[in-house]
Image (cartoon, rainbow, N blue to C red):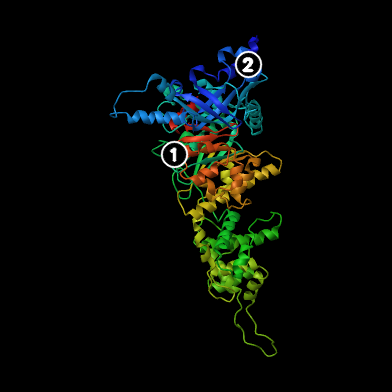
Amino acid sequence: MQNISQILQSDSLVKLVQKENFVGWAYYIDYEKAFVMTNDLWKHNSLGVPHNCFLVAATFNPDEYNQTPNEEKEVLLLRVIGSCKLPQDDDLVRTRVDHFQQKKSAFDTKDYDDITLNQLQFGGLECRVLGTFYIANGVLKLGSDLESFASASRLKLYRPRKDALDTIVNYVDPQRKQKSIEEAKELGLKKTIESFPIGTVRYTSTERIHRQANEAVPVRIQPSDFLARRTAVLGMTRTGKSNMIKQLVSVVKRVADQGDTKVGQLVFDMNGEYANANKQDKGAIADIFPKDTVRYRMMSAEGFEPLQNNFYLQLEEGFSLLCEMIIEKKRDGSNDIKTFLNISLEKPEATDFGEIKKWNVRVALYRALLYQSQFKAPPNLILKFEANEAVRKAVQQTSGTTIFKNPADGLTPAEAVDWFLALRQAAKPVKKTKKRKVGDDDDEHDDSTSVAADWLNNKDDLVAMLNLLAAKNNLDTPIAGYKIFFDAKEFHTPNRTKDVGREIYEHLVNGKIVILDLTVGKPSLRERLTKNIADQIFTSSMGHFIEGKSPENIVMYIEEAHNLIGKDADLDDTWPRIAKEGAKYKIALVYATQEVSAMHPNILANTENWFITHLNNHKEINELAKFYDFDDFSKSLIRAQDVGFTRVKTLSGSFVIPVQIDKFDPLVEKSKLKQ
């Protein structure tokens, strides 16, 4: 006889076998599959056997577990993947045909005799072997395979419901659970966080029977599965991808709050679904977490911060973007442009006074060039730099005015343009200003003009920018000049004092939810801005890691991911690097797309969490079937288009679970915050 302790330990295994839900016998089994004989009555009593549903198989009687031989103390976990023929099916088909041929009308009530009817009720199910439940050291464990099988075994099959199904779909291996606790501590979670429900088990699109009100079984996810991990949200438009992402944002926020830590979240909102309330959700993320959400947009709007940088103040960022656009569009390959591309606007050390003076002149000229290119200047912007008296005199004489300001006292951008244009003219060679005297070798030139030229000597960067400012080369031949910068005006805003990338990173470090509303602006503009922001975040987190510091947790959400980390993407580019290396720097990536086959295979192969809704063609299904046991759901994924009907595989889960994801409801989410 077993002692009480042993009986209690085995309870979790025995409870998986529910006698009232018996559905049949296994008449064939191997390491991969099992074929089951079932009956219409047994299926009816267990509320049906839907496609893709879980079944458990055992030889023991749960009421007599004490007498069960040790080798039989296990429960096999199976998934129904289709039907199969029984040996007598061909004969039974003939019986049915003969019976229907004898019918006089469609409503003829004459039925089979009892013996024949009993035979006709039997059918076959094909099942995939998912693993084996057993007890080890008093703990319920699940092996992901079949250790052995007896061909002559009397395996009885049951459809798990309620508590038994809850145990199966929410099972986490004890070692994995312990590891997740340790990982949570490493990620900065100060408290143990329980798993969060995201939806309920759903096997098929038709849910008339198996999802009755008292049959809905919640599916939970482990919080640590999504921090510093990659998560794929795949499926067609309007099948629930956005709803899933909103749920994840909400879950991660609750995890951070309950774990007493900060987790920054950055949403690249291509369609405005997260930044703004809509009729479907009756609210937005910003409404649920108003104090912890910061929204950005590429146009002025109440409640939104400007997404662009101020080129006048964020010098290096703006200059870098200008250079990228020039190189990308292959505009004007003149020497002036080549020189401009190699200019440095990085500020020298404050103690290097000589270099600081040169830098002030260079920056003032660069800002004048921006102004000439119609970049709107910030209010009250004043440009200051030093020029000696002789140079100022030359500029004043060339300008033809006697009221020319000293740039050390400050110039407006418009005045700076005039000053630098006059400087350029003053430095040009001029005709003789005095007649040749007897004995002179050369004509005399104006001394002030020579001073201006000398001042620009060996300053190719200034000369190049002066030429761009005047739209003329050294020979005064017209060139495009400052006009090549016109396309970059959309990237600029005068209403910003801090670099947008650094500002966003600071928000993320402080645990904020940052939403970038990218519905406004050209696609090329959106792509460039998002890439620059992502690059700054990745570089900053990597910098902390390299310095031996622990980076803050950040979760990034992107849609239309195939455009950013497609199969032809360079793995050294920004987005692929985030997807490939971000976990090392505590950056989690949640990417959504409907084109699985267009994604980079390296990224797919290293994705830990999967949420798959409806896909509409076999090419995408075949690509998905390469991963885990998604092949079992190929037909269902093509056929079922129900919103939120998702197949889920998480890091802690041992197999794919079909789930109806809970609808994102702002009112429900707000109520959770009060609990």
Residue that carries the numbered disc 2 in the rendered image? 9
Q: Secondary structure at mark 2?
A: helix
Q: Position of residue 611 (x, y in %)?
A: 52, 37
Say which amino acid is labelled 1. Answer: Arg
Task: Report if residue 644 is visible in the image.
Answer: yes
Q: Is residue 542 above or below residue 31?
A: below
* Distance in Å between CA atoms under marks 1 and 2: 42 Å
For label 1, the residue is 639
In the shown orientation, is residue 671 left or right of residue 608?
A: left
Report crowding for label 1: few under 14, some 14 to 19, many 20 or more residues within 10 A (C-alpha): some
Q: Residue 384 or 327: which is nearer the viewer? A: 327
The label shown at residue 64 is none
- Residue 203 lies, in percent from the top left, at 47, 31
Q: Could you tell me how many numbered marks the image carries? A: 2
Q: How would you rate the neighbour count of disc 2 (Cα within 10 Å): few for under 14, some for 14-19, many for 20 or more?
A: some
Residue 362, horizontal then vertical, whole percent: 62, 62
Q: Which of the two marks, 1 or 2, is nearer to us in this view?
A: 1
Viewer-nearest residue: 326 or 120: 120
The N terminus, quarter of image: top right
Position of 650 relative to 497 (above/below): above
Camera-side residue of 385 and 551: 551
Going 54% across and 27% down the picture, which residue do you hit?
169
Q: Quadrant of residue 666?
A: top left
Most foreground residue, 405 or 69: 69
Label 1 SS: helix
Label 1 or label 2, whichever comes before in sequence order: 2
Percent coordinates x, y for residue 484 in the rendering? 52, 65
Query: Is residue 385 something one can see in this rendering?
Result: no
Amino acid on which the number 2 mark rests in the picture: Gln
On the image, which quarter does residue 578 sit in?
top right
Residue ID at (53%, 74%): 478
Q: Badges 1 and 2: C-beta atoms under 8 Å apart?
A: no
